[in-house]
Image (cartoon, rainbow, N blue to C red):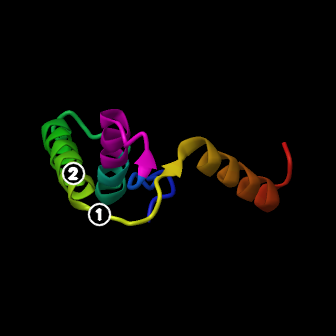
Amino acid sequence: MCRNIRVLHNFEPPATEDEVRAAAVQYVRKVSGSTRPSAANQEAFDAAVEAVAEATRVLLDSLVTTAAPRDREVEAAKAKERSAARFGPR
């Protein structure tokens, strides 16, 4: 759907409120089709972001797994390797 929305489940340390909110903003931007809503739509946009963020928090708190938590630095290194393989070294 949107490449900027990252997996937030099963990380150590758990996802922060900022990460949850950033994912919610990206989702609402994608669904609404605009990165910046007009002044007339700002209230609806903000309400949608808060609703999606709350739903995300509830989801993350409800999920269970038997897998070991992932490390953010290791996952970032893997993503960097994939990017280098796809686009070449910078």
> Where is residue 40, by image quadrant?
top left
Marks 1 and 2 in Cβ contact (< 8 Å): no
Mark 1 Cα within 10 Å, few/some/many (few <14, many 20+)? few
Q: Amino acid at mark 1?
A: Val
> Where is residue 41, by image quadrant?
top left
Q: Residue at x 29, y 51 (%)?
A: 28
Q: Amino acid at mark 2?
A: Val
Between 16 and 31, the one lying in front of the other is 16
Callout 1: helix, strand or loop? loop
Q: Badge 2 is on which residue?
A: 52
Kindly identify which numbered label has been placed on residue 31: none
The picture places residue 1, in percent across and down from the top left corner, at 44, 66
Between 33 and 22, the one lying in front of the other is 22
The picture places residue 72, in percent across and down from the top left corner, at 54, 44
Q: Residue at x 34, y 34 (%)?
A: 18
Q: Would residue 31 be counted in the magenta stretch?
A: no
Q: Badge 1 is on which residue?
A: 64
> Which contiguous range is marked in magenta?
11-25
Q: Residue at x 55, y 47 (%)?
A: 71
Picture mark count: 2
Callout 2: helix, strand or loop? helix
Between 38 and 63, the one lying in front of the other is 63
Q: From the image, which quarter does the C terminus lie in?
A: top right
In space, the residues marked 1 and 2 are separated at their CA atoms by 20 Å
